Amino acid sequence: MKGLKKKRRVQIIVVAAVSLAVSTAMIGYALRGGINYFRTPSQILSEHISPREVFRVGGLVKAGSIKPTDGVDFTFVVTDGKKEIPVDYVGASAKPDLFEGGKGTVATGTWNGKVFRATQILAKHDANYMPREVLDALKKDGMYVKPGSS
C-alpha cells in the first residue's frame, strides 16, 4: 500500500509539471503576436529592422505632411525633432478626427527601409494627453512643450 501511494504522488507531480510547461508554452505562443515594440524615428533609421517585424513608431506628426491617398488611406511624416520618417497608413478606418499636424501619435505597422506602413493609428484624445512612450522620448530629446505653455 505504501508503494502505491508513492507511485500516485510521483504521477501527480509529473502530470502537474507537464501541465505547467504546456500552459506556459501556450501563453507564450498566444502573446507573441501581441507584443509591439515602440521606436522613435531616430531609432528606426539607426537600426536594421526586418520588414516582417511589427512594431510601433511614435512622435509628432509633422505639420502640413498629412496627404490623402486612395479611400481611407493617407500619408504623413512622423518626427522626433531630430529625424523624420514617412508613414503610409493602409488601415481599414478613416483618419481619426483628432489626428493633425503638430500632435503626438503612435502608429503600428512595419518598416520596409524607406516607408513605415501603418495599419493602426492612435491620436491624442484631449488637450493634455500624449502616449507615454512618445512623451518620454520627446522629453529625452528636449522637444517636449507642455500644453498651454506655447
Image (tube, rainbow, N blue to C red):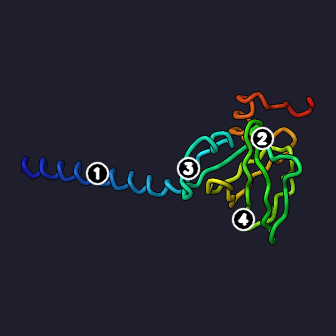
Look at the numbered disc 1 and give the secondary structure of its residue: helix
- Where is residue 27? Give x, y as percent: 44, 54
Foreground disc of the pair 3, 1: 3
The tag earlier along the polypeptide, 1 or 2, is 1
- Give the side of residue 145 with respect to residue 50, left or right: right
| Residue type at tag 3 | Ile
For image coordinates 44% across by 57% down, the residue present is 29
Which label sits on residue 93? none
| Separation of residues labelled 3 and 2 (CA atoms) | 25 Å
Res 39 quadrant in image = top right
**Residue 90, label in figure:** 4
Q: CA distance from mark 1 to mark 4?
A: 46 Å
Closer to the chain start, of discs 1 and 4, is: 1
Classify mark 2: helix, strand or loop: loop
Of the residues shown, which amino acid type is indicated by label 2? Answer: Met
Residue 101 position within the rendered picture, expressed as x and y whole percent measured from the top left:
86, 48
Disc 4 crowd, CA 10 A, few/some/many (<14, 14-19, 20+):
many
Tag 3 residue: 49
Question: Closest to the observer: 66 or 2?
Answer: 66
